[in-house]
Amino acid sequence: MAALVSCQCDQGVCECQSDPFQPERERIARFLQEKKDYRPEEIKLLVPLVIEIPGKRLYTKADIVVEPEGRPAICIRLNEGSVVSRERGTIAAARLLKPEAPPPLCVQTNGQEYSILDTYTKKSLGVRLEDLPSREEMLKILKERQPKPLSPKQIEAESKILFFYDGIG
């Protein structure tokens, strides 16, 4: 169970959960820079996602988004528990991150285990951070692979999936 901390905001003082994944998020960002040659400005942390389905709104996030040359390439999400059981929610988050040009790769991790997935085909591409492409390799992938924009029907379906994983499950 995450510890509660007091937060001060324009709403007054409230109790908020501490961020148990902050050290892991920072470790992954360092790895991407030091071992895979991504630039610091290409690594975005805690990227918000707002998902709307009829009558409901969900505020969630991608923990890390890697954007070489400004194009989403990798979406990484951290969650407790089984990595495999959360893969589909991570694919949905990656697809909704930028529906007109989703990143080709996504990663679900609990901090110890990793599942690297093709965002379009859902196929497994690896189980270690080392399996991620370097910046140079990713630029080639982005150049060779045209983005597959989501249709409105696909956006609706992915929104429901992500709402289930992050809002209910």
Image (cartoon, helix red, strand yellow):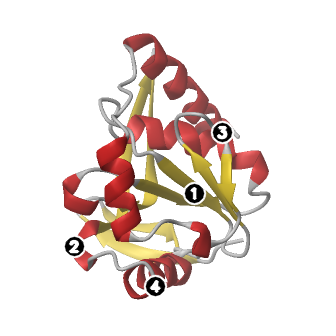
Q: Which residue is mark 3?
A: 88
- Calculate the distance from the C-alpha at mark 1 to the C-alpha at mark 4: 17 Å
| Image location (x, y in percent) of residue 76 | 50, 59
Amino acid type indicated by mark 1: Val
What residue sits 63% from the left and 38% below the top? 122
User: Considering only order in the chain, which callout, 3 or 1, is on the residue closer to the N terminus?
Assistant: 3
- Is disc 3 surrounded by few (<14), some (14 to 19) or many (20+) residues within 10 Å? some
Q: Secondary structure at mark 2?
A: helix
In the image, 153 versus 23, the foreground residue is 153
Q: Are marks 1 and 3 in contact (CB under 8 Å)?
A: no
| Image location (x, y in percent) of residue 115 | 68, 58
Amino acid type indicated by mark 3: Arg
Amino acid type indicated by mark 4: Lys
Q: Which residue is mark 1?
A: 107
What residue sits 60% from the left and 68% below the top? 131
- Of badges 2 and 4, nearer the viewer stands 4
- Is disc 2 surrounded by few (<14), some (14 to 19) or many (20+) residues within 10 Å? few
Q: Which residue is mark 2?
A: 41
